[in-house]
Amino acid sequence: MELARHESAPVPYSVIAGASLFQTQDVEEARQWGVRTFCESTLNTVSRQRSINARLHLRKVRGVGFGRITYGGEVNIDPGSFESFYLVQVPLSGRELVEVGGEAVCSAGKNGSVINANAPVLIRHEPNTEKLVVRVDREALERNCIQHLGHGMRRPLEFRPSMSLDSQGGMRWTGLMRWIYESLAIDEQSFDPAIIAAQIEQMVITMLLTCQPHNYSEELAGEERSIAPAFVKRIERYSYIEEHADEPITIVDLAEHAGVSSRSIFNGFRRFRNTSPMLYLKEVRMRRVNEELKRLTPGETTVTAVAYQWGFTHLGHFTTDYKRRFGESPSQTLAR
């Protein structure tokens, strides 16, 4: 994973600065920051060394948080268990020994870790260790899992604690993380608009559910029965997407509106419309951008402002898609 290598210019802490951040050499102060940011826990140095050099930044985007942590020295962290969230950890340097639900994981090099909610956990953080973390709210994760399954969960969601970063799934996960951190490096407010934040949350949760093995993986990968076109038409004809295109719609929202599972929505759009529900939403938003650029003048707005308003964060991809769709660049449309 390129993001997790020992790079000369790693992601700066300021990029992911948010509501929770600290830098301290005091063990108790670091523990208190950990409690405020994550949950109640104990933090103890392992050797006779009393001081550490702890630093944490966490950038929240709806139900997910992107962070970077180091404690400098060797410490033991005992949070008991994470009741309200799951934590995915990707090593940047050094190593951690993580015990999750009685299973030991060495988080170092090409191996990360996933800490399940409600699982007993102990972390031995070795000297000169640094990591990226993704904190995922349990409620948001379970809501998405239930929608993809199409029924309630018979038992708690449990991921495999060890994450192989050079596996196919691990590379997809780290590829997404690379894009997210690079986007924050370019503009730390790029995910602030609600319409974009919803897409980021949905993307991260879906990627985690599909890339990291868990006790529902086999069921999620199974074939879904075909659904009647009425469910697709319910989303289209009753103008749900048209009326809510400027809002942070996710696949889960569409599924709940139609009264079926997320997999049914994907299956229905693929079979009856030869597209995906989110591509259909993207087409609606692209049309709205075109209409707005035609209505306004260069003195009233910019292409960037309109694109961001409608949820397009990558301007290079947006411009390419726009030209393919309308035969001219968005700046040409605005100038006419």
Image (cartoon, rainbow, N blue to C red):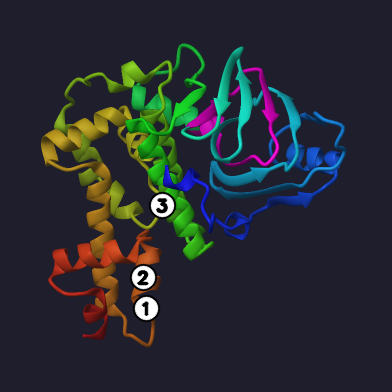
Residue drawn where x is 39% and y is 84% of the image: 300
- Going from the N terminus, do you reach mark 3 or mark 1 first? 3
Q: Do the residues labelled 3 and 2 touch (CB within 8 Å)?
A: no
Magenta segment main secondary structure: strand
Does residue 43 lie above or below 183 as drawn? above
Which residue bears the numbered disc 1? 302
Q: Is residue 78 left or right of residue 260?
A: right
Q: Which of 67 and 167 is in front in this view?
A: 167
> Is any part of residue 115 visible from this angle?
no
Which residue bears the numbered disc 3? 179
**Marks 3 and 1, how far apart at CA:** 24 Å
Q: Which residues are drawn in magenta? A: 111-140
Q: In this view, does 32 lie to the left or right of 218?
A: right
Which secondary structure, mark 2?
helix
Does residue 207 lie above or below 103 as drawn? below
The image position of residue 90, as x and y in percent, is: 53, 37
**Marks 1 and 2, how far apart at CA:** 6 Å
Q: Are marks 1 and 2 in contact (CB under 8 Å)?
A: yes
Dot label at residue 306:
2
- Outermost residue toward the bottom in this view: 299
Residue drawn where x is 43% and y is 15% of the image: 215
Question: Is residue 125 in the magenta section?
Answer: yes
